[in-house]
Amino acid sequence: MFEDLRGKRALVTGAFGGLGSHFAKVLAGAGVQVALAGRRVEAGQQIVAQIKQDRGAACVVPMDVTDAASVADAFDAAESLLGGPVQIVVNNAGIAVTRPAVECDAHDWQSVIDVNLNGAWRVAQTAGQRMIAQREGSILNIASILGLRVAQQVPAYAAAKAGLIHLTQALALEWARHGVRVNALAPGYIETDLNRDFFASEAGQALIRRVPQRRIGQPDDLNGALLLLASDAAAFMTGAVLAIDGGHLVSSL
Ligand code: NAP
C-alpha cells in the first residue's frame, strides 16, 4: 500500500519535536526522502541519524516559520539536498500557550498566531508556488480538534487552528486545478514527551475519561491518515479535514 510514495521528496516542519519527528520517520519508512525542517538543527541531526540507521533517506534544513526568508531558504536547501522539488509538505510546526483569555497578553496571542497560523501560511504559500509550477503536490496541515471545538485557556491556539482549517479549504479550492492537494489532520490528544506527565496525573486521567474511546492517542494512530493524504491513494481528496481523536469531537454535550 502507498507504494507511490517510494522515492518521493517531502519536507516536514517542526520536525524535531514529538509529532514532527514521528511524521518524518513514518514517511521515511515508506520510502520517502525527507527534509526535516526546524530551528534546533543539532537535535535534527540526531533524528536524521536514526532514520539513516533504519535505511531511510533524510536531511536537516534550518527553518524558522516566523521568518519568510528562512522558509524560502529551507525549501531551496531541501530541493538541492533531495535532488528535486518537494512533492509532500507536512505543515506541523506549532506552539501552545495555556492561559485564561483575560490574562493573555499581546505576546501570548501574537506568538501563537505567528507560528500556528501565519507560519503555516508562509510554508503553505511557498510550497504551493513551487508545486503549482510542477503541477504536483500534497500539503498536509496539522491542525487540531481545537480548531473544530473549543476548550478553556487556549484562545489563541483554538483560533489559529480554526484559521488553519479554513486556510486549508481556501488553498484546496484555489490549487485543485493545478494538481496540488491541500488537506488537514485534526488530531485529538496524542501522547508525546511533552504531555506524558500531564496525562498520568489526576487531571489528565479525568480528561481521558471524557474521550469516547477512553484513551488518548499514540503517534502511530496518525500514521494511516498521514500516509493516505500524502499518497496518490488520496488523489481525489482535497480540502478534507480528518479528525483522529478516539471520538473526542463527538463526545456527548
Ligand atoms: P512539539 O513537540 O512541541 O513540537 C512542535 C515543533 O514545532 C517543535 O519541533 C518546535 O521546534 C517547532 N516550532 C515551534 N516554533 C517554530 C518556529 N518558529 N519555526 C520552526 N519550528 C517551530 O509539539 P507536538 O505535540 O509534536 O505538536 C506538533 C503539531 O501537532 C503542532 O502543530 C500541534 O499544534 C499539533 N497537535 C499536537 C497534538 C498533541 O496532542 N500532541 C494534538 C493536536 C495537534 P523547536 O523545538 O525548535 O521549538
Image: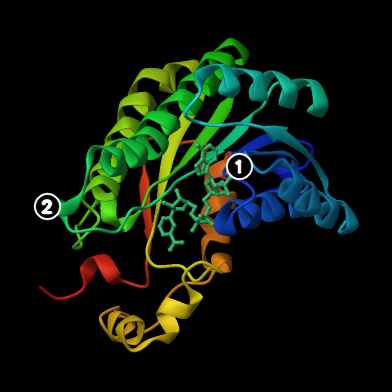
Residue furthest out toward the top: 133
Up the image or down, 235 lies above or below 203; here it is above
Neighbor class of circle 2 (other Cα within 10 Å; few <14, some 14-19, many 20+) is few
Neighbor class of circle 1 (other Cα within 10 Å; few <14, some 14-19, many 20+) is many
Up the image or down, 105 lies above or below 76; here it is below
**Looking at the image, which residue is at 43% across and 17% down?**
177
Mark sitting earlier along the chain (1/2)? 2
Element type at mark 2 = helix
- Between the residue at mark 1 and the residue at mark 2, the CA separation in whole angstroms equals 43 Å
Q: Which residue corresponds to mark 1?
A: 231
Q: Position of residue 33 (x, y in %)?
A: 77, 39
Considering the image in quadrants, where does the N terminus appear? bottom right
Residue 214: quarter of image: bottom left
The amino acid type, in three-letter code, at marker 1 is Ser
The amino acid type, in three-letter code, at marker 2 is Val
**Which residue is more in the foreground, 155 or 26?**
155
Q: Is residue 59 left or right of residue 106?
A: right
Q: Position of residue 37 (x, y in %)?
A: 65, 37
Q: Is residue 228 left or right of residue 161?
A: right
Q: Is residue 108 left or right of residue 32?
A: left
Q: Which residue corresponds to mark 2?
A: 102
Residue 58 in sight from this viewpoint: yes
